[in-house]
Image (spheres, rainbow, N blue to C red):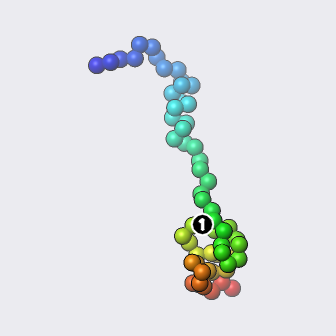
Amino acid sequence: MPVPKRKLTRSRTRTRRAENRKIVAAAHSLCANCGASRLPHTVCGNCGWYRGRPVISVE
């Protein structure tokens, strides 16, 4: 079975592992009714509209 010839440094190992820890911001889309920023496929919390029609009443 193959064995590494030299020990990997901490920086090389941690650099490789750090790629999986990157934080990615959630995608946002604009509401077609009021223009507020909202998560995709969810009801707008500002006006209560979803897919071109009112779904909930927001007071």
The crowding category of the residue bearing disc 1, from other C-alpha atoms within 10 Å (few below 14, some 14 to 19, many at least 20), is some
Picture residue at 52% right of the left edge, 32% below the top:
16
Quarter occupied by residue 2: top left
Of the residues shown, which amino acid type is indicated by label 1? Leu
Q: Position of residue 56 (x, y in %)?
A: 59, 84
**Total marks in image:** 1
Left or right, residue 47 beside residue 17:
right
Position above or below: 31 against 25: below
Circle 1: element type: loop
- Which quadrant would the C terminus be assigned to in this image? bottom right
Position above or below: 26 against 49: above
Quarter occupied by residue 38: bottom right
- Residue occupied by mark 1: 39
Quarter occupied by residue 14: top right
Left or right, residue 46 beside residue 51:
right
Judged from this view, the residue extending furthest toward the top is 5
Picture residue at 54% right of the left edge, 25% below the top:
12
- Which quadrant would the N terminus be assigned to in this image? top left
Judged from this view, the residue extending furthest toward the left is 1
Position above or below: 22 against 26: above
